[in-house]
Amino acid sequence: MVAILGTLGFRANSLLPTLESTSGVDKVVVFCNDHPRALDALTEVQRVCSIMGIPIDRVAMSDAFDLLQAAKAMRSQVRQLKKEGHEIAVFNIAGGTKMMSAAALLVCAMEGLNSVYVHDETYREIPLPLLKVDYSQLLTTAQKEILTYIWRNRAKPMTQVDIALGMGKHKATINHHIQILEGKNVLHLVEDPNDRRRKVVRVDDALELMLEMD
């Protein structure tokens, strides 16, 4: 079973070239919002899919400008398709808002998917050179445990000493892993706004996606 995914904006032609160039497709999943012009484009894609005899599902984007929410929805769909036994041939990221395209590209990188962009004027497909990297192998078990602890306690500023005490680990061990994680740009050491002599650990909201790798 072969599926293709695509973000969709106001132009059906941003997705149709991929539909026409990919062989053996038996499922199409489209991510788009409720803007009338986006729904018009969806109707055209549905018409073409009907002619080709390919089922199409639409995943509604409630907020097309929320990167994390969009990435979560897309990733959930990708994992569901994989669970059902589908091979995802390609993810077309050409349509929709810039934030939707960015979310789709992020998901492609994290899930090891082929991705393609379609030129706005020529409608020529442009494959994007993403390396197929297994992100789940980029962090050790110890690093994942530290990040999970930081994420669950992110509401309060914590120093490396706080983390060591909270996890019952040696300070040198925590410092070692924090240094590596900072080098990987997974977290940041910043000044404590309440005490400039202290460095606290800060993580971004997107860390939630990284912790869902397994």
Image (tube, rainbow, N blue to C red):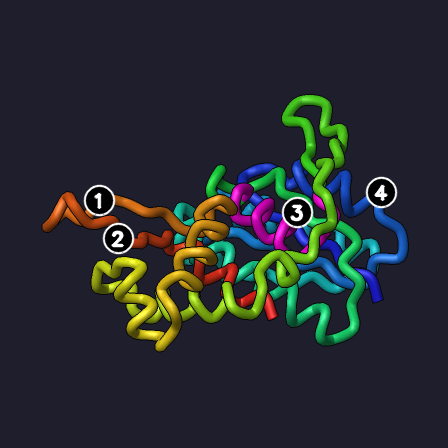
Q: Name the element at disc 1.
A: strand
Amino acid residing under circle 4 = Ser
Marks 1 and 2: in contact by CB < 8 Å? yes
Amino acid residing under circle 2 = Val
Foreground: 189 or 77?
189
What distance separates the C-alpha of mark 4 from that of mark 2?
50 Å
The residue that disc 3 covers is 44
What distance separates the C-alpha of mark 3 from that of mark 4?
17 Å
Query: Closer to us: mark 3 or mark 2?
Result: 2
| Label of residue 10 in the image | none
Q: Where is residue 113 drawn, in percent x and y?
A: 72, 52
Foreground: 203 or 161?
161
Neighbourhood count class around disc 2 (C-alpha, 10 Å): few under 14, some 14–19, many 20 upward: many
What distance separates the C-alpha of mark 1 from that of mark 3?
53 Å
Q: Residue at x 55, y 42 (%)?
A: 101
What distance separates the C-alpha of mark 4 from that of mark 1?
52 Å
Q: Residue furthest right?
A: 24
**Mark found first going from the N terminus, 3 or 4:** 4
The residue that disc 4 covers is 21
The residue that disc 1 covers is 191
Which portion, as a residue range, is magenta?
101-115
**Mark found first going from the N terminus, 4 or 1:** 4
Q: Name the element at disc 3.
A: helix
Q: Residue at x 76, y 33 (%)?
A: 125
